[in-house]
Amino acid sequence: MFELMDKAPADPIMGITELYNTDTNPNKINLSMGVFKDEQGNTPLLSCVKKAEAKIYATEDTKAYSAIEGFSSFNDAVLPLIFGADHEAVTSGRSATIHTPGGSGALRIVGDFLTKLSPSNTIWVSDPTWVNHINIFETAGLQVKRYPYFDKTTNGLAFDTMMSALKDIPAGDTVLFHGCCHNPTGVDPSNDQWQQISDLVHGNGLMPVLDFAYQGFAEGIREDGEGPLKLVQPGKETLICGSFSKNFALYNERTGSLTAVAADAAAVNIATSQIKSVIRAIYSSPPAHGGIIVSTILNDPELRTQWESELKQMRERIQNMRQLLAETLTAKGVPGDHSFITRQRGMFSFSGLNPTQVEQLKNDHSIYIVGNGRINVAAITPDNCDALCEAIANVS
């Protein structure tokens, strides 16, 4: 049977890393994967994580299955992390968090949950969006459509065009939004624009889904939620997918969350019961270790303080690399105004490089970038930035 199948195409991002790994150039640069790197080009293990693991290993006495929704210590700590302990969605009891295998797992559960609600459900994603969004939702059986988001002429948000398109989406459809540090553009709405988006979405009877994968990577833990959490209005429904791969650097632990916000406490109990039935059919219960690390840190004041400090250091390093990248591109004579790079937020920059230039960078300079021109700024270092910008100048 397997011989009758066609070989699947390489993943648009993972496939690039496979090519990078086979490249023998000692000066090769991989800017494709969404992974934080320190100034030495390494993906660090946070000190707070190492301390939490030592604490876990000293007290852990079982490897028994967790519940379908994961451990309550994780879920009860993550809910106020997303909202703040005093948020109406928390104090009212109308929201609940479930531990998932990474943010990708949360998105897939959302896809299956929405398909279960309505087999003809349509989900709208930004144009552009993270490439795997479409793959995940189509595999779950949803119809995927796009709404405009990025303005190439300003390297900013096409807000008016986006709002006009959102107005035309039929009531009952689902709309996916990036919480902060939009992937791949690095362009986010302002808080005022988020309020307008929220009013339109709920006023037109649309279901918002928030992909909140980079909390703390733009301005801060609370600051990053101020705008997107305007989608959470009293008495209205929202689904929030969280990830701890980036802000805890727990990439291979696959630790994420799905938070359901319903009209009231009774409704969220119904929603979570249906979500749990979806989970039972896929993987039964989540892998525990990453969730225990997160809950241990969030529930220990000393470790929590250390985590916030390390998160701040990661955020500031990315901001510094944005500044260095913009300045070096200008110094190398690359055409254009590169100040937009410093206005973008999070790990990614939509560089403006076209597919031909991306291919040249790979073939001639061993620099690996996603075909749409997305650059992982967090993989740039003071040591490789000059060579990167020199190469971009050569293909511009």
Image (tube, rainbow, N blue to C red):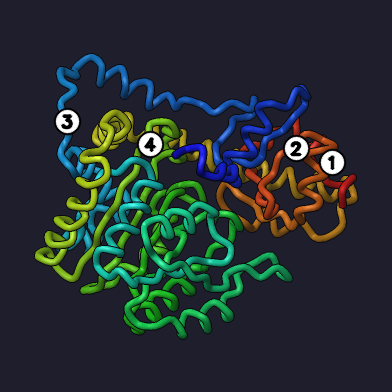
| Furthest residue in direction left, as rendered | 266
- Determine the CA span between mark 1 and mark 3: 51 Å
**Mark 4 or 1 closer to N-term?**
4
Q: Position of residue 358 (x, y in %)?
A: 76, 48
Kind of element beneath mark 3: loop
- Determine the CA span between mark 2 and mark 4: 27 Å
Question: Mark 4 highlights which residue?
Answer: 254
Rendered position, 390 above or below 258: above
Kind of element beneath mark 4: loop
**Mark 2 or 4 closer to N-term?**
4
For the N terminus, the image quarter is: top left
- Determine the CA span between mark 2 and mark 1: 8 Å
Q: Position of residue 60 (x, y in %)?
A: 19, 19
The residue under the point 57% across, 39% down is: 14
**Mark 3 or 4 closer to N-term?**
3
Question: Mark 3 highlights which residue?
Answer: 65
- Determine the CA span between mark 4 and mark 1: 35 Å
Do the numbered discs 2 and 1 sit on residues whose CB atoms are within 8 Å? yes
- Determine the CA span between mark 3 and mark 4: 17 Å
Identify residue type, mark 3: Tyr
Do the numbered discs 4 and 1 sit on residues whose CB atoms are within 8 Å? no
Question: Mark 2 highlights which residue?
Answer: 367
Do the numbered discs 1 and 3 sit on residues whose CB atoms are within 8 Å? no
Q: Which mark is residue 326?
A: none
Do the numbered discs 3 and 4 sit on residues whose CB atoms are within 8 Å? no
In the image, is 116 to the left or to the right of 391? left
Identify residue type, mark 1: Ala
Question: Mark 1 highlights which residue?
Answer: 391
Q: Position of residue 8 (x, y in %)?
A: 55, 44
In the image, is 315 to the left or to the right of 155? left
For label 2, count other residues whose C-alpha is less than 10 Å away and answer few (under 14), some (14-19) or many (20+): many
- Determine the CA span between mark 2 and mark 3: 43 Å
